[in-house]
Each structure stands twice: as C-alpha cells, then as structure tokens.
Image (cartoon, grey):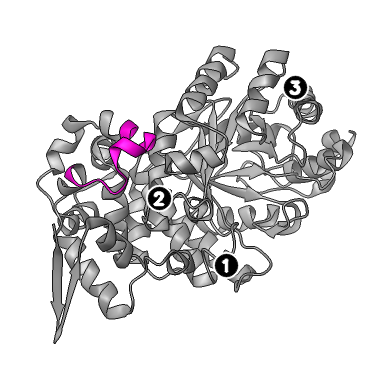
Amino acid sequence: MKYQESIGNFSYTFKTLKEVMAKATPERSGDAMAGVIAENEKERIAARLVLARVSLRQFLEEQLVHYEVDAVTRMMNDSHDGSAFSSIAHLTVGGFRDWLLDYETDGDKIKNVSPGLTPEMVAAVSKIMSNQDLVLVASKIRIVTKFRNTLGLKGHFSTRLQPNHPTDDIKGIMASTIDGLMYGAGDAVIGVNPVSDHVETARVVIDMLEDLRLRYDIPTQTCVLAHVTTTLDLIEQGAPVDLLFQSIGGTEKTNTSFGISLELLEEAHQAGKELDRGTVGQHVMYFETGQGSAHSANAHHGVDQQTCEVRAYAVARKYNPLLVNTVVGFIGPEYLYDGKQIIRAGLEDHFCGKLMGLPMGCDICYTNHINADQDDMDNLLTLLGVAGCNFIMGVPGADDIMLNYQSTSFHDQIYIRQLLGLRYAPEFELWLQKMTLMDDQGRMLEQTSANKLLQL
C-alpha cells in the first residue's frame, strides 16, 4: 500500500506505514543516523498529513516489525484487547488526537481504551501532536501503583533517591542516601546502580538499604539496579529484594542485546510476587527505557527510534510495574542531539507511557558531551510537573559521579513541589512529619532537625 500527499507543486509518496511513521517524526539525530528521517520539513509535514488520515485499524493490519521475526510483535498482537479498542476503532490518527484533546475525554475514558492501543497507534498520534498537546493529554491520566506506599495519585509527586558511588563504597552510598532523605527524596524508591554486577556486591548494598529501612521504619521500597538475573540470584540467596529491575527495549533483538527475553521477565515477575514483601500493594517490577536503545543495538528493523521506544512500553505493560522511567538524554547526542530534542523526547515518552497505562517517570538528564545544559533540564522538569509525571530522579548535586551524566537534584524535586503544590506519597509524607523533616504544610524543615538520621 502506498501513501501519498501533495504540498504545492511537490508530490510525496511513502511506500509503507513504517516510512510514514519515521518521516512524520520530529527531527532527531538518531533517526538521521539510521537513515529514516525526512529529507526536509516539507516532507515531514507531508508525512504528518498522511499519518493523520491513517485509520487506527491499519496498525493492526500492517506490522512495522513482522510477527514472524519478533517476539515483542507476537506478544502485542496475541494479547490485543479488541473489546477495549472497539469504541475508537472507527477513528483515524487525527480523529484520535481530537478525541484525546476533547473536553469530555477524561482520564477514566482514556484508561478504558488503553488496553486496546498498540504502541504504534500511540506513537503515531504523538507524532502529530504539539508539545502543548502532549502535556495536556498526559495531565488527564493518573496511573496509581503500590508497594509500601502509594504512587501516582493526583496532586502527588515522587522521587527516586539515586545514591550511586563510583566504587560501590558502602559508606558513600549511605551518606548520599541520608542526604537525600533529609531533602524528602526517596518515596518512589531508593535505587542504587552498582558499578559491579556481581551478586556479592549487590548483596552488600541491598542489605545496607534494608537495615536502614527497617531501623527507621521508612515506608518506601529499595532496589539495586543490577541485571535481572543477578536479582534472581539474590532471591535464591534469601536477600531482601523489594523490586526487580531491568532495562528493556521495543524489539526482541534489543532485549537480546540486554541479555533478556520475555520469558525471563515473566520468571522475574512471578518471583517478585511470591516474595510478598509489599504492604499496601504488590507491584514488583521497575523498568527503564530510552529512545535510541534499539538503534544503538542495530535492532530497530528500520523503525524510527521513538516508535521503538513506545514498543518497549508494551513490554513493560505486560508485567504491571511499580515504576517505569525513560532515561531520556542518557545515551547521548548520537540519538538526541540537543536540549530541544531531549525536551520533545521527554514529553513524548511521558505521554506515550501514560497512554499505554504505565506509571511513567523520567530521568531528566543529559551527557556531558551533548548540546544541552541544566536550564534545558529545568524546562523539561517544569513541563513534566504540569503534565503529571509520576516521579523523577534525585541525585546529589544533579551530578551522577558513577554514571557520569547530569540529572536532577534533591533540590529540584522541592522546586517542582513548591511551584505546583505537589505532595509526597501519602505514607512517606507522614513519615517525614514523624521524623520532623517536614512540617504539616509539606515544607521541608532545616536539616538540623534531622538529628535522628544524623546519629547514623
């Protein structure tokens, strides 16, 4: 099937839906490197006009990555919820955009159709939406998840406390953790990226976090962000595992490059649930994604990087996670060249994840060799706060000295709370008040009031 559009004296023909999708995508360096980008702005506009007329049903008939060669495609097709899709099946991509923006379409209506949406449908509608559209629709959607506290409620906002250390020094990790807790970070998770993926290293860190949590009765969850097979080994040892983490991608080849399969993720999900360590819920999975991962693994099948990213959300959705975050600028300028591309990608990822029914957070970040700075991150943080983002990162000084990139600081989460009147996870907020770290108005107190923690 050919797709055609004329603009003035120019006529544009696109051979496949995959080509339409790629050329309708806002400009980004990863697609240019992969050779799938529009040649110019006129061709990009033509592709968007074509895409707006495509029926949502067409995405069920024309696969971007073929069923026979990709386990992610097979999983999506075999589990598609036709009943949830039926109420919007008559719409085009443009009509779907209009429906999402309609005054009468609230978050509940969107969540009702979400199980019937394929990632290609979701990616398609995002490509014809402005940044403003992405913020508005995402702000309607609340995805609530639970483990030891309740995340994603309207008017609430959470933070992953990220106390990484370049040598996995346990005292250094502890110092950063205490620092973050005194600023109110950590209600999403206290999560450490270990330098070493050895089980022995992960066990030392996870035992330390568990001791801290139990000693002060902190209503949060902890996680060592090792490979999922390492975490399964920890479970075999009887380690106090709360969440099982894994980076995931949107194609089978991408996930193979990460050393995982859908079957392995299912095993991890079942193992986590069997531990039964949650107190208010049993969402046990934590996934991270990022535009460009499929391209960097040469596993994109000619699909644009943003659509590959949304396919990763279909993988995440299958396992009902507590947390999902896009590490938006981490891979580097080869995939997102500058601050403008990072901001657009962050808004796309958050919107698409929420539309897929996921509890989306964002690591608002950039590498030191990218054409971006902290002002760009402040802009994206503010936009995501307005859009109802579930959580961000809290990194000491916004500078991760282990992963060597720039993110958001403990202070940044206080800024967005003060700006928008956002509260912590309810259970965690009560704990902050009990520890005299916060007053009853949600304002953090002077650190000198944190004597209980400082006694460590």
Residue 40, given in percent of the width and then of the height, sits at 33, 79
Rendering coords of residue 203 (x, y %)? 77, 25
CA gap, disc 1 to disc 3? 42 Å
Q: Position of residue 339 (x, y in %)?
A: 54, 70
Tell me the kind of residue under disc 1. Answer: Pro
Q: Which residues are magenta?
A: 61-75
Query: Mark 1, mark 3: which one is toward the viewer?
Result: 1
193 in relation to 326, above or below? above
183 or 433, which lies in front? Answer: 183
Q: Position of residue 263 (x, y in %)?
A: 47, 24
* Residue, disc 2: 308
Q: Could you classify mark 1 by the number of other residues whose Cα lies within 10 Å: few (under 14), some (14-19), or many (20 or more)? A: many
Which of disc 3 and disc 2 is earlier in sequence?
3
Magenta residues, dominant SS class: helix
- Which-is-in-front pick, marks 2 and 3? 2
Residue under label 1, please give it.
333
Q: Is residue 252 left or right of residue 235?
A: left
Identify which amino acid the numbered label 3 is placed on.
Answer: Leu
Q: Is residue 455 above or below residue 312?
A: above
Within 10 Å of the Cα at label 2, are there few (<14), some (14-19), or many (20+) other Cα atoms?
A: many
Residue hosting label 3: 214
- The answer to whether residue 394 is visible is yes
Q: In terms of image quadrants, where is residue 259? A: top right
Q: Is residue 108 visible?
A: no
